[in-house]
Image (spheres, helix red, strand yellow):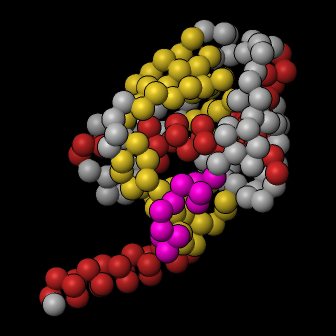
């Protein structure tokens, strides 16, 4: 296992469509996944896609533990914000609800920034694990957000491309000031 360098926004590997994996059980796939997991954990990420470590393959790893859930999630989302460590090879997503929710996202390939990104709230994802077993799970809330974010990498998409208002793309170091300014604006609008 090895910690790999993470590609950053602008590198061509992040803009291309990743190739399907012919054999999920191949030793080279197992080695790549082991490196991806180690890299994700080292970088404190909730997920990582193979293109982010310069491998244009349709592989994602993710976890959505409770402590990674965004602050202030509502009760509706709170019931399903966890996902165990998952390896998903050749993933497919089926959207179950047309409902879209805005949520804050960051990305290891876009370091230091956060953006407010619209995502579907409920989906089923399918793919294969390292032993070739078929995986199929339903996801909502933060779990669904993480899956969509990671699978976007396989189609050459980064979260800023999903944003509807780039005024909501901020540096993490400025988040507190940004939120305070927004709260003040809302308070003034109510008082007016």
Give the image quarter of residue 185: bottom left
- Residue 54, given in percent of the width and then of the height, sits at 82, 42
Asked whether the viewer can see residue 12, the reply is yes
Residue 49 x %, y %: 68, 38
User: Which segment did they paint magenta?
Assistant: 158-168
Q: Is residue 59 left or right of residue 106?
A: right
Is 117 magenta? The answer is no
Instruction: Label the magenta part by its dominant secondary structure.
Output: helix
Please indicate whether residue 146 sits to the left or right of residue 61 in the image.
left
Work out which quarter of the rendered image holds the C terminus and state it: bottom left
At 57% across and 11% down in the image, what residue appears?
A: 134
Left or right: residue 69 versus residue 131 is: left
Where 94 falls versus 44 (above or below)?
Answer: above
Q: Position of residue 50 (x, y in %)?
A: 74, 36
Residue 3 at x, y percent in the picture: 80, 42
- Residue, x 75% and y 34% (percent of image)? 18
Q: Which quadrant would residue 177 be assigned to in this image?
A: bottom left
Place residue 23 in its image quadrant. top right
Residue 167 highlighted magenta (yes or no): yes
Give the camera-side residue of 90 and 2: 90
Q: Nearer the viewer, residue 143 or 98?
A: 98
Q: Quadrant of the N terminus?
A: top right
């Amino acid at each position: 296992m090895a910690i790999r360098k993470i590609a950053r926004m602008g590198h061509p590997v992040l803009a291309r469509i990743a190739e399907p994996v012919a054999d999920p059980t191949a030793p080279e796939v197992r080695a790549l996944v082991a490196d991806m997991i180690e890299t994700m954990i080292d970088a404190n990420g909730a997920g990582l896609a193979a293109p982010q470590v310069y491998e244009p393959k349709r592989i994602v790893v993710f976890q959505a533990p409770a402590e990674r859930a965004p602050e202030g999630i509502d009760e509706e989302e709170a019931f399903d914000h966890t996902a165990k460590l998952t390896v998903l090879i050749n993933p497919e997503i089926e959207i179950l609800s047309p409902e879209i929710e805005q949520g804050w996202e960051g990305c290891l390939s876009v370091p230091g920034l956060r953006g407010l990104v619209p995502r579907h709230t409920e989906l089923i994802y399918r793919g294969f694990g390292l032993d070739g077993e078929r995986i199929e799970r339903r996801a909502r809330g933060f779990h669904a957000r993480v899956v969509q974010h990671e699978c976007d990498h396989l189609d050459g998409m980064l979260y800023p491309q999903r944003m509807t208002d780039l005024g909501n793309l901020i540096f993490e170091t400025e988040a507190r000031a940004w939120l305070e300014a927004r709260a003040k604006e809302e308070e003034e609008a109510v008082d007016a």
